[in-house]
Image (spheres, helix red, strand yellow):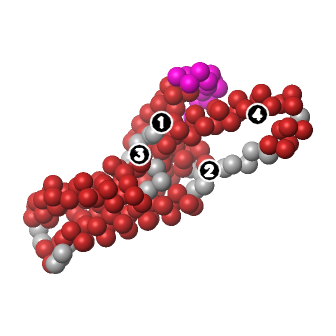
Amino acid sequence: MRQADREKLVINWRERWHPFVLQILARRLPVKADVADLAQEVYLRLLRVDTLDLVENPRAYVCRVAINIAEEWRLRLAKMPIDRSDATIEDTLAAPGNLEDWLNQQQNRQVVETALMSLPLNHRTALVLHVTRDLTYPQIAEHMSVTRRQVKRYLAKAYDRLRQDMIGAGIRPAPADTDNEQ
């Protein structure tokens, strides 16, 4: 099947079943912000299939691709859990002078987590890889199949958005370190 024919077919399927794809993804994903990005991944994957014209039940095929992508994304998120190594409530209550600091820290963490989850998928992925896995820009670029320059843009926009959200919540961000591209 020619690429042009494949593109027309995928566009047709997208027009017919896009709301259905969004619904499938929304039911299976813990973070609703990921739905639109992963819907695009469905169509990108379909474009890579050489034999789309042989699919007997296109709606079921699109559905299966969406389910597979949602499951892959959930597994990927499970491998990168958010670190919740907080002091326990009992420890905090044992030192009442620290209670206010602990509550502020919890509020700050919630603001950061909410801001992080509201980032576009590519921005969040680049940021998580950079911060939690300490990957360099070239390593992130290779992992995400984008250019180093695009990684730099993703990170700049992610940090800017997080900074704005923190300021909007009344949290004073720490001074920015000069980030090496390595």
> Closer to us: mark 1 or mark 3?
3
* Magenta stretch bounds: 167-182
Looking at the image, tell me whether mark 1 or mark 4 is earlier in sequence order: 4
> Closer to us: mark 1 or mark 4?
4
Horizontal side of 30 relative to 42 (left or right) equals: right
Are discs 1 and 2 less than 8 Å apart at CB?
A: no
Q: Secondary structure at mark 1?
A: helix
Q: CA distance from mark 1 to mark 4?
A: 26 Å
Q: Secondary structure at mark 2?
A: loop
Q: Secondary structure at mark 3?
A: helix
The question of residue 180 being in magenta is answered with yes
Q: Quadrant of residue 51?
A: bottom left
Mark 3 surroundings within 10 Å by alpha-carbon count, few (fewer than 14), some (14 through 19), many (20 or more):
some
| Residue carrying label 3 | 33
Q: CA distance from mark 4 to mark 3?
A: 29 Å
Q: CA distance from mark 3 to mark 2?
A: 17 Å
Q: Position of residue 133 (x, y in %)?
A: 60, 51
Quarter of the image that includes the C terminus: top right
The residue that appears at 73% across and 32% down in the rendered structure is 103
| Residue carrying label 1 | 158
Q: Position of residue 77 (x, y in %)?
A: 52, 57
